[in-house]
């Protein structure tokens, strides 16, 4: 399964250069529904999920294999604005302020590895 994330130019270029190895998404219902597995979503609300997820990460998130990072919303085949990276998991924790996270704020942290192509 593929997880597609749109980025602003600064974060896209840092990710493409291999500097930025994770992305941050708000802890809200939209991202909860998009990232959490159906098993966790059907019995849990977001607050309960946050408490449970870091101790049981393998059954809480969808089984993503690839993170497709895009610069905005490119046309299909615009390879200069699309990066496919290995999906390395999701955690709930604070992020790096140098990579766009607010100091002390919790996020869904989406980790990615090297090229998936």
Image (cartoon, helix red, strand yellow):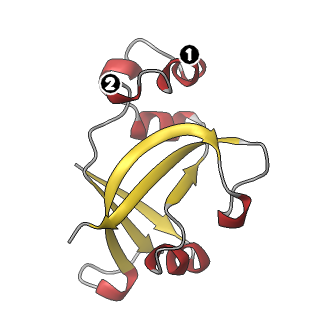
Residue 97, quarter of picture: bottom right
For marks 2 and 1, give the one nearer the viewer. 2
Is residue 104 positioned above or below 75 on the image?
A: above
**Mark 1 or mark 2, which is nearer the start of the sequence?**
1
Q: Position of residue 41 (x, y in %)?
A: 40, 22
Please tell me which residue is depicted at 48% across the width and 24% down the height of the picture.
53
Query: Which residue is disc 2 drawn over?
Result: 59
Please tell me which residue is depicted at 29% across the width and 85% down the height of the picture.
79
Query: Which residue is disc 1 drawn over?
Result: 48
Left or right: 97 in relation to 41 = right
Q: Position of residue 4 (x, y in %)?
A: 36, 59
SS of the residue under disc 1: helix
Measured Cα–Cα span from mark 2 to mark 1:
14 Å
Q: Nearer the viewer, residue 95 or 26?
A: 95
Total numbered labels? 2
Quarter of the image with the C terminus is bottom left
Q: Residues within 10 Å of mark 2 (few under 14, many from 20)?
A: some
Q: Position of residue 27 (x, y in %)?
A: 60, 37
């Amino acid at each position: 399964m593929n997880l597609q994330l749109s980025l602003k130019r600064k974060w896209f270029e840092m990710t493409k250069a291999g500097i930025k190895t994770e992305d941050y998404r708000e802890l809200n219902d939209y991202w909860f529904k998009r990232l959490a597995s159906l098993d966790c979503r059907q019995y849990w609300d977001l607050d309960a999920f946050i408490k449970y997820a870091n101790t049981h990460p393998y059954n809480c998130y969808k089984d993503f294999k690839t993170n497709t990072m895009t610069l905005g919303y490119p046309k299909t085949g615009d390879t200069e604005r699309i990066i496919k990276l290995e999906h390395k998991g999701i955690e709930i924790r604070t992020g790096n302020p140098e990579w766009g996270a607010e100091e002390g704020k919790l996020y869904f942290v989406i980790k990615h590895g090297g090229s998936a192509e």
